[in-house]
Image (cartoon, rainbow, N blue to C red):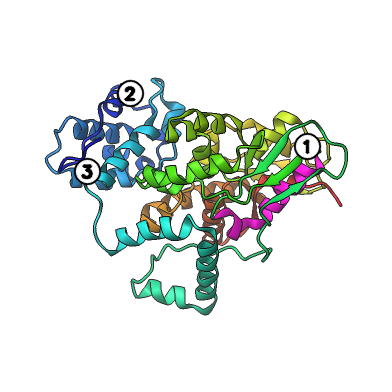
Protein backbone atom coordinates (compact mmCIF):
# COMPACT_ATOMS: atom_id res chain seq x y z
CA UNK A 1 0.00 0.00 0.00
CA UNK A 2 1.33 3.44 -0.87
CA UNK A 3 2.31 5.50 2.11
CA UNK A 4 0.64 8.84 2.73
CA UNK A 5 1.89 11.46 5.15
CA UNK A 6 -0.10 9.82 7.95
CA UNK A 7 -0.63 6.14 8.82
CA UNK A 8 -3.94 4.75 7.62
CA UNK A 9 -5.16 1.15 7.87
CA UNK A 10 -5.97 -0.69 4.67
CA UNK A 11 -9.64 -1.55 3.99
CA UNK A 12 -9.18 -5.20 5.02
CA UNK A 13 -7.83 -4.25 8.44
CA UNK A 14 -10.60 -1.68 8.87
CA UNK A 15 -13.20 -4.34 8.04
CA UNK A 16 -11.73 -6.65 10.71
CA UNK A 17 -12.07 -3.89 13.30
CA UNK A 18 -15.83 -3.77 12.64
CA UNK A 19 -16.20 -7.30 14.06
CA UNK A 20 -15.79 -5.89 17.57
CA UNK A 21 -19.19 -5.29 19.22
CA UNK A 22 -17.65 -3.50 22.25
CA UNK A 23 -19.19 -5.91 24.75
CA UNK A 24 -16.28 -5.49 27.17
CA UNK A 25 -15.78 -9.19 27.93
CA UNK A 26 -12.14 -8.74 26.96
CA UNK A 27 -11.42 -6.14 29.65
CA UNK A 28 -10.88 -8.48 32.64
CA UNK A 29 -8.49 -10.62 30.58
CA UNK A 30 -6.32 -7.70 29.41
CA UNK A 31 -3.16 -7.28 31.54
CA UNK A 32 -2.74 -3.56 30.84
CA UNK A 33 -6.38 -2.83 31.64
CA UNK A 34 -6.07 -4.80 34.89
CA UNK A 35 -3.20 -2.55 35.95
CA UNK A 36 -4.42 0.84 34.69
CA UNK A 37 -8.24 0.46 34.52
CA UNK A 38 -8.11 2.78 31.48
CA UNK A 39 -10.35 2.17 28.46
CA UNK A 40 -7.54 3.21 26.12
CA UNK A 41 -5.38 0.42 27.62
CA UNK A 42 -7.97 -2.26 26.79
CA UNK A 43 -8.55 -4.26 23.58
CA UNK A 44 -11.93 -2.60 23.07
CA UNK A 45 -10.47 0.86 23.49
CA UNK A 46 -7.53 0.15 21.22
CA UNK A 47 -9.81 -1.18 18.50
CA UNK A 48 -11.80 2.05 18.64
CA UNK A 49 -8.54 3.99 18.29
CA UNK A 50 -7.43 1.84 15.35
CA UNK A 51 -10.82 2.28 13.69
CA UNK A 52 -10.62 6.05 14.13
CA UNK A 53 -7.15 5.93 12.57
CA UNK A 54 -8.45 3.93 9.62
CA UNK A 55 -11.28 6.38 9.04
CA UNK A 56 -9.04 9.44 9.25
CA UNK A 57 -10.70 10.75 12.41
CA UNK A 58 -7.46 11.08 14.40
CA UNK A 59 -6.01 14.57 14.27
CA UNK A 60 -2.61 13.48 15.57
CA UNK A 61 -1.81 9.78 14.86
CA UNK A 62 1.30 10.00 17.04
CA UNK A 63 -0.90 10.75 20.05
CA UNK A 64 -2.58 7.35 20.03
CA UNK A 65 0.52 5.28 19.25
CA UNK A 66 1.63 4.90 22.92
CA UNK A 67 -1.65 3.16 23.79
CA UNK A 68 -1.09 0.68 20.95
CA UNK A 69 2.55 0.18 21.91
CA UNK A 70 1.53 -0.61 25.49
CA UNK A 71 -0.33 -3.72 24.27
CA UNK A 72 1.61 -6.94 24.99
CA UNK A 73 -0.11 -8.75 22.09
CA UNK A 74 -0.83 -11.63 24.49
CA UNK A 75 -4.11 -12.43 22.66
CA UNK A 76 -6.02 -13.24 25.82
CA UNK A 77 -8.77 -11.04 24.42
CA UNK A 78 -9.10 -13.38 21.43
CA UNK A 79 -9.82 -16.30 23.75
CA UNK A 80 -12.71 -14.49 25.44
CA UNK A 81 -14.09 -12.58 22.41
CA UNK A 82 -17.58 -13.86 21.45
CA UNK A 83 -17.30 -12.23 18.02
CA UNK A 84 -14.05 -13.94 17.03
CA UNK A 85 -12.11 -10.72 16.53
CA UNK A 86 -8.56 -11.44 15.34
CA UNK A 87 -7.10 -8.70 17.48
CA UNK A 88 -3.48 -9.75 16.98
CA UNK A 89 -3.75 -9.41 13.21
CA UNK A 90 -5.34 -5.98 13.55
CA UNK A 91 -2.68 -4.74 15.97
CA UNK A 92 0.19 -6.04 13.86
CA UNK A 93 -1.27 -4.41 10.73
CA UNK A 94 -1.55 -1.09 12.57
CA UNK A 95 1.99 -1.25 13.90
CA UNK A 96 3.28 -2.06 10.41
CA UNK A 97 1.44 0.94 9.01
CA UNK A 98 3.03 3.20 11.63
CA UNK A 99 6.47 1.87 10.75
CA UNK A 100 5.85 2.49 7.04
CA UNK A 101 4.50 5.99 7.34
CA UNK A 102 5.52 7.43 10.71
CA UNK A 103 8.44 5.48 12.20
CA UNK A 104 9.51 6.55 15.64
CA UNK A 105 12.64 8.72 15.78
CA UNK A 106 15.44 8.99 18.29
CA UNK A 107 18.27 6.84 19.59
CA UNK A 108 16.04 4.34 21.40
CA UNK A 109 13.93 3.58 18.32
CA UNK A 110 17.03 3.29 16.14
CA UNK A 111 18.66 0.98 18.66
CA UNK A 112 15.62 -1.32 18.80
CA UNK A 113 15.46 -1.61 15.01
CA UNK A 114 19.19 -2.22 14.76
CA UNK A 115 19.28 -4.86 17.48
CA UNK A 116 16.26 -6.78 16.17
CA UNK A 117 17.56 -7.05 12.62
CA UNK A 118 21.35 -6.94 12.92
CA UNK A 119 21.81 -8.82 16.22
CA UNK A 120 18.78 -10.89 17.29
CA UNK A 121 18.15 -12.23 13.78
CA UNK A 122 21.79 -13.31 13.42
CA UNK A 123 22.72 -16.13 15.77
CA UNK A 124 26.53 -15.62 16.01
CA UNK A 125 26.11 -11.91 16.80
CA UNK A 126 23.36 -12.63 19.32
CA UNK A 127 25.51 -15.22 21.07
CA UNK A 128 28.37 -12.71 21.32
CA UNK A 129 26.00 -9.99 22.59
CA UNK A 130 24.59 -12.25 25.31
CA UNK A 131 28.12 -13.22 26.36
CA UNK A 132 28.96 -9.52 26.72
CA UNK A 133 25.77 -8.93 28.74
CA UNK A 134 26.66 -11.78 31.08
CA UNK A 135 30.10 -10.23 31.63
CA UNK A 136 28.54 -6.80 32.22
CA UNK A 137 26.11 -8.30 34.73
CA UNK A 138 28.82 -10.18 36.66
CA UNK A 139 31.11 -7.13 36.76
CA UNK A 140 28.38 -4.71 37.85
CA UNK A 141 28.63 -2.63 34.67
CA UNK A 142 25.01 -3.35 33.79
CA UNK A 143 23.75 -2.00 37.14
CA UNK A 144 25.95 1.07 36.75
CA UNK A 145 24.65 1.70 33.22
CA UNK A 146 21.07 1.46 34.51
CA UNK A 147 21.75 3.99 37.29
CA UNK A 148 23.29 6.37 34.75
CA UNK A 149 20.30 6.02 32.44
CA UNK A 150 22.33 4.25 29.74
CA UNK A 151 20.38 0.99 30.05
CA UNK A 152 16.81 0.10 31.07
CA UNK A 153 16.35 -0.34 34.83
CA UNK A 154 14.15 -3.32 34.08
CA UNK A 155 16.89 -5.46 32.51
CA UNK A 156 16.21 -8.94 33.94
CA UNK A 157 18.72 -11.35 35.37
CA UNK A 158 20.36 -13.25 32.52
CA UNK A 159 20.08 -17.01 33.00
CA UNK A 160 23.42 -18.74 33.63
CA UNK A 161 24.72 -20.77 30.72
CA UNK A 162 24.22 -24.46 31.50
CA UNK A 163 25.89 -25.73 28.33
CA UNK A 164 28.53 -23.59 26.63
CA UNK A 165 28.51 -25.57 23.38
CA UNK A 166 25.84 -24.60 20.86
CA UNK A 167 23.59 -27.34 19.59
CA UNK A 168 25.27 -28.51 16.36
CA UNK A 169 23.25 -27.78 13.24
CA UNK A 170 23.15 -30.13 10.32
CA UNK A 171 22.51 -33.06 12.67
CA UNK A 172 20.60 -36.09 11.41
CA UNK A 173 20.09 -38.59 14.21
CA UNK A 174 18.22 -41.90 14.12
CA UNK A 175 16.51 -43.06 17.32
CA UNK A 176 18.71 -45.33 19.48
CA UNK A 177 15.95 -47.93 19.81
CA UNK A 178 12.91 -48.92 17.81
CA UNK A 179 11.79 -46.29 15.35
CA UNK A 180 8.16 -45.34 16.03
CA UNK A 181 7.14 -44.58 12.46
CA UNK A 182 8.50 -42.97 9.32
CA UNK A 183 8.31 -39.34 10.39
CA UNK A 184 11.18 -36.94 9.78
CA UNK A 185 11.13 -34.53 12.73
CA UNK A 186 13.14 -31.32 12.50
CA UNK A 187 14.02 -29.08 15.46
CA UNK A 188 13.54 -25.33 15.25
CA UNK A 189 16.19 -23.71 17.45
CA UNK A 190 15.29 -20.03 16.98
CA UNK A 191 17.39 -17.09 18.12
CA UNK A 192 17.18 -16.27 21.84
CA UNK A 193 16.29 -19.79 22.99
CA UNK A 194 19.58 -21.41 21.98
CA UNK A 195 22.10 -19.07 23.71
CA UNK A 196 19.93 -18.62 26.82
CA UNK A 197 18.28 -22.03 27.19
CA UNK A 198 20.28 -24.37 24.98
CA UNK A 199 19.82 -27.11 27.59
CA UNK A 200 16.10 -27.11 26.78
CA UNK A 201 16.90 -27.84 23.12
CA UNK A 202 19.07 -30.75 24.23
CA UNK A 203 16.28 -32.06 26.45
CA UNK A 204 13.83 -31.81 23.54
CA UNK A 205 16.24 -33.68 21.28
CA UNK A 206 16.80 -36.35 23.92
CA UNK A 207 13.08 -36.84 24.52
CA UNK A 208 12.27 -37.15 20.81
CA UNK A 209 15.04 -39.67 20.22
CA UNK A 210 14.12 -41.69 23.32
CA UNK A 211 10.54 -41.87 22.07
CA UNK A 212 11.58 -43.32 18.74
CA UNK A 213 11.71 -40.37 16.34
CA UNK A 214 14.31 -39.62 13.71
CA UNK A 215 15.48 -36.02 14.27
CA UNK A 216 17.30 -33.44 12.17
CA UNK A 217 18.51 -29.91 12.97
CA UNK A 218 18.63 -27.93 9.69
CA UNK A 219 21.77 -25.83 9.39
CA UNK A 220 20.27 -22.99 7.34
CA UNK A 221 17.35 -22.13 9.64
CA UNK A 222 16.96 -18.56 10.92
CA UNK A 223 15.12 -16.58 13.59
CA UNK A 224 11.34 -17.01 13.28
CA UNK A 225 10.74 -13.25 12.88
CA UNK A 226 8.30 -12.89 15.79
CA UNK A 227 9.92 -9.80 17.33
CA UNK A 228 10.03 -8.11 13.93
CA UNK A 229 6.34 -8.83 13.29
CA UNK A 230 5.37 -7.49 16.72
CA UNK A 231 7.42 -4.32 16.18
CA UNK A 232 5.82 -3.52 12.83
CA UNK A 233 8.43 -4.96 10.43
CA UNK A 234 6.71 -7.85 8.63
CA UNK A 235 8.85 -7.09 5.57
CA UNK A 236 11.98 -8.10 7.48
CA UNK A 237 10.21 -11.07 9.04
CA UNK A 238 9.21 -12.35 5.59
CA UNK A 239 12.86 -12.60 4.59
CA UNK A 240 13.53 -14.87 7.57
CA UNK A 241 10.34 -16.85 6.98
CA UNK A 242 11.28 -17.59 3.38
CA UNK A 243 14.67 -18.92 4.51
CA UNK A 244 13.02 -21.11 7.14
CA UNK A 245 10.52 -22.52 4.67
CA UNK A 246 13.44 -23.56 2.45
CA UNK A 247 15.49 -24.91 5.38
CA UNK A 248 12.68 -27.22 6.56
CA UNK A 249 11.40 -28.25 3.13
CA UNK A 250 12.49 -31.90 3.44
CA UNK A 251 10.98 -32.67 6.86
CA UNK A 252 7.53 -33.94 7.80
CA UNK A 253 7.16 -32.13 11.14
CA UNK A 254 8.79 -28.97 12.53
CA UNK A 255 8.82 -28.94 16.34
CA UNK A 256 9.68 -25.99 18.57
CA UNK A 257 9.92 -25.41 22.31
CA UNK A 258 9.27 -21.64 22.46
CA UNK A 259 5.62 -20.54 22.45
CA UNK A 260 6.30 -17.14 20.90
CA UNK A 261 8.35 -18.61 18.07
CA UNK A 262 5.82 -21.37 17.52
CA UNK A 263 2.92 -18.96 17.20
CA UNK A 264 4.71 -16.97 14.50
CA UNK A 265 5.89 -20.10 12.69
CA UNK A 266 2.32 -21.35 12.67
CA UNK A 267 1.22 -18.10 11.02
CA UNK A 268 3.64 -18.21 8.09
CA UNK A 269 0.62 -18.79 5.87
CA UNK A 270 -0.61 -15.29 6.73
CA UNK A 271 2.86 -13.72 6.81
CA UNK A 272 3.96 -15.06 3.42
CA UNK A 273 0.54 -15.40 1.80
CA UNK A 274 1.56 -18.31 -0.43
CA UNK A 275 1.29 -22.10 -0.61
CA UNK A 276 4.81 -22.64 0.74
CA UNK A 277 4.00 -20.64 3.88
CA UNK A 278 0.71 -22.50 4.33
CA UNK A 279 2.42 -25.89 3.95
CA UNK A 280 5.05 -24.94 6.52
CA UNK A 281 2.39 -23.73 8.97
CA UNK A 282 0.52 -27.04 8.68
CA UNK A 283 3.53 -29.16 9.61
CA UNK A 284 4.73 -27.00 12.49
CA UNK A 285 4.02 -28.29 16.05
CA UNK A 286 4.76 -27.30 19.62
CA UNK A 287 6.87 -30.11 21.07
CA UNK A 288 4.46 -30.82 23.94
CA UNK A 289 1.46 -30.93 21.62
CA UNK A 290 3.36 -33.21 19.23
CA UNK A 291 4.43 -35.63 21.97
CA UNK A 292 0.93 -35.70 23.41
CA UNK A 293 -0.56 -36.56 20.01
CA UNK A 294 2.01 -39.30 19.37
CA UNK A 295 2.10 -40.62 22.94
CA UNK A 296 5.14 -41.32 25.12
CA UNK A 297 6.86 -44.66 24.67
CA UNK A 298 9.66 -43.85 27.13
CA UNK A 299 8.80 -43.25 30.80
CA UNK A 300 10.10 -39.92 32.15
CA UNK A 301 12.54 -39.94 35.06
CA UNK A 302 11.07 -39.60 38.54
CA UNK A 303 10.65 -36.06 39.87
CA UNK A 304 9.25 -35.82 43.39
CA UNK A 305 8.07 -32.22 43.59
CA UNK A 306 5.05 -29.94 43.69
CA UNK A 307 4.94 -28.00 40.44
CA UNK A 308 2.77 -25.28 38.92
CA UNK A 309 2.38 -25.19 35.15
CA UNK A 310 1.95 -21.66 33.80
CA UNK A 311 0.51 -21.24 30.31
CA UNK A 312 2.56 -19.05 27.96
CA UNK A 313 0.20 -16.61 26.24
CA UNK A 314 1.23 -17.55 22.72
CA UNK A 315 0.76 -21.21 23.51
CA UNK A 316 -2.68 -21.13 25.14
CA UNK A 317 -4.19 -18.09 23.39
CA UNK A 318 -2.16 -18.11 20.19
CA UNK A 319 -2.10 -21.87 19.56
CA UNK A 320 -4.87 -23.29 21.73
CA UNK A 321 -2.48 -25.66 23.52
CA UNK A 322 -3.54 -26.05 27.15
CA UNK A 323 -4.34 -29.62 28.16
CA UNK A 324 -1.48 -31.37 26.32
CA UNK A 325 1.42 -30.19 28.53
CA UNK A 326 -0.55 -30.99 31.68
CA UNK A 327 -1.45 -34.45 30.39
CA UNK A 328 2.20 -35.23 29.68
CA UNK A 329 3.39 -33.87 33.02
CA UNK A 330 0.82 -36.09 34.75
CA UNK A 331 2.87 -39.02 33.44
CA UNK A 332 6.03 -37.94 35.28
CA UNK A 333 6.50 -40.29 38.27
CA UNK A 334 6.33 -38.45 41.60
CA UNK A 335 5.30 -35.06 40.15
CA UNK A 336 2.29 -33.32 41.74
CA UNK A 337 0.74 -30.65 39.54
CA UNK A 338 -0.69 -27.80 41.60
CA UNK A 339 -3.22 -25.34 40.16
CA UNK A 340 -2.71 -21.63 40.69
CA UNK A 341 -5.02 -18.64 40.37
CA UNK A 342 -3.91 -17.03 37.08
CA UNK A 343 -2.39 -19.69 34.80
CA UNK A 344 -3.38 -17.97 31.53
CA UNK A 345 -2.63 -14.36 32.45
CA UNK A 346 0.36 -12.68 30.83
CA UNK A 347 3.56 -12.47 32.88
CA UNK A 348 4.58 -9.16 31.29
CA UNK A 349 7.58 -10.38 29.29
CA UNK A 350 6.19 -10.25 25.73
CA UNK A 351 9.47 -10.36 23.84
CA UNK A 352 11.28 -7.10 24.59
CA UNK A 353 8.22 -5.43 26.14
CA UNK A 354 9.70 -5.64 29.65
CA UNK A 355 12.69 -3.62 28.40
CA UNK A 356 10.63 -0.95 26.63
CA UNK A 357 7.77 -0.59 29.14
CA UNK A 358 9.39 -1.54 32.41
CA UNK A 359 6.81 -0.06 34.81
CA UNK A 360 3.82 -1.82 33.27
CA UNK A 361 5.75 -5.06 32.77
CA UNK A 362 6.84 -5.04 36.41
CA UNK A 363 3.29 -4.54 37.69
CA UNK A 364 2.03 -7.38 35.49
CA UNK A 365 4.92 -9.68 36.39
CA UNK A 366 4.46 -9.09 40.10
CA UNK A 367 0.81 -10.20 39.88
CA UNK A 368 1.88 -13.43 38.21
CA UNK A 369 4.64 -14.13 40.73
CA UNK A 370 2.31 -13.51 43.68
CA UNK A 371 -0.10 -16.20 42.47
CA UNK A 372 2.75 -18.67 42.08
CA UNK A 373 4.07 -17.90 45.56
CA UNK A 374 0.56 -18.46 46.95
CA UNK A 375 0.48 -21.90 45.28
CA UNK A 376 3.43 -22.97 47.47
CA UNK A 377 5.23 -25.08 44.86
CA UNK A 378 8.76 -26.40 44.53
CA UNK A 379 9.17 -25.43 40.88
CA UNK A 380 7.40 -23.58 38.08
CA UNK A 381 7.02 -24.95 34.56
CA UNK A 382 6.41 -22.83 31.47
CA UNK A 383 7.21 -23.14 27.77
CA UNK A 384 8.65 -19.83 26.59
CA UNK A 385 12.07 -18.23 27.20
CA UNK A 386 10.74 -14.74 28.00
CA UNK A 387 8.23 -16.18 30.47
CA UNK A 388 10.95 -18.27 32.14
CA UNK A 389 13.15 -15.19 32.64
CA UNK A 390 10.31 -12.88 33.74
CA UNK A 391 8.80 -15.32 36.25
CA UNK A 392 12.22 -16.19 37.67
CA UNK A 393 13.10 -12.53 38.20
CA UNK A 394 9.81 -11.65 39.89
CA UNK A 395 9.89 -14.68 42.17
CA UNK A 396 13.36 -13.58 43.25
CA UNK A 397 12.18 -10.00 43.74
CA UNK A 398 9.47 -11.27 46.10
CA UNK A 399 12.03 -13.26 48.05
CA UNK A 400 10.66 -16.64 46.92
CA UNK A 401 13.11 -18.00 44.34
CA UNK A 402 12.02 -21.26 42.75
CA UNK A 403 13.47 -23.19 39.81
CA UNK A 404 11.67 -22.22 36.58
CA UNK A 405 11.97 -24.94 33.97
CA UNK A 406 10.59 -25.91 30.60
CA UNK A 407 8.12 -28.83 30.85
CA UNK A 408 9.96 -30.86 28.20
CA UNK A 409 12.89 -31.13 30.62
CA UNK A 410 10.77 -33.28 32.91
CA UNK A 411 10.01 -35.74 30.10
CA UNK A 412 13.63 -36.90 29.74
CA UNK A 413 13.81 -40.61 30.62
CA UNK A 414 16.08 -41.88 33.41
CA UNK A 415 19.59 -42.87 32.20
Callout 1: SS: loop
Q: Looking at the image, is mark 2 or mark 3 earlier in the sequence?
A: 2
Asked if the residue at tag 1 contacts the one at tag 3, i.e. Cβ–Cβ closer than 8 Å, the answer is no
Is any part of residue 378 visible from this angle? no
Real-space CA distance between mark 3 and mark 1, rounded to the nearest whole angstrom: 49 Å
Instruction: Using the image, determine if residue 43 lies above or below residue 391.
Output: above
Q: Which residue is mark 1?
A: 331
> Quarter-wise, where is residue 216 in the image?
top right
Q: Quadrant of the N terminus?
A: top left
Closer to the camera in the image, 236 or 62:
236
**Left or right for 217, reference 121:** right
Name the residue located 25 percent from the left edge and 53 percent from the top edge.
Answer: 104
Percent position of residue 84, x then y = 41, 22
Percent position of residue 286, x then y = 62, 38
Instruction: Using the image, determine if residue 117 lies above or below residue 251.
Output: below
Q: Looking at the image, is mark 3 or mark 1 earlier in the sequence?
A: 3
> Quarter-wise, where is residue 256 in the image?
top right
Real-space CA distance between mark 2 and mark 3, rounded to the nearest whole angstrom: 22 Å
Real-space CA distance between mark 2 and mark 1, rounded to the nearest whole angstrom: 41 Å
Q: Which residue is mark 2?
A: 23
Name the residue located 36 percent from the left edge and 55 percent from the top edge.
Answer: 357
Indicate yes or no whether the magenta region holds residue 183.
no
- Of the residues tagged 2 and 1, which is closer to the observer? 1
Report the magenta stretch's main SS. helix
Q: Which residue is mark 3?
A: 64
What is the magenta range? Answer: 192-211
Amino acid sequence: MACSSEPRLDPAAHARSLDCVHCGLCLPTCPTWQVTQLETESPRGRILLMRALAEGRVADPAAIRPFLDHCLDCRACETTCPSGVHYGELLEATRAEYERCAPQRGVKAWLVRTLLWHVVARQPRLRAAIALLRHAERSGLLRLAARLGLAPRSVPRIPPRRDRRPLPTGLHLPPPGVRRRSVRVALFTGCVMEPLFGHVHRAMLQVLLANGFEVTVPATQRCCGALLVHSGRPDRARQLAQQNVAAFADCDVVVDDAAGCGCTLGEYDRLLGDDAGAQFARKRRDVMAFLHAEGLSATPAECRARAAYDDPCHLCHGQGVRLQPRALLAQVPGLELVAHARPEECCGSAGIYHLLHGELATAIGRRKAETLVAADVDLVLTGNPGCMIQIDNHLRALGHPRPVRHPVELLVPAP
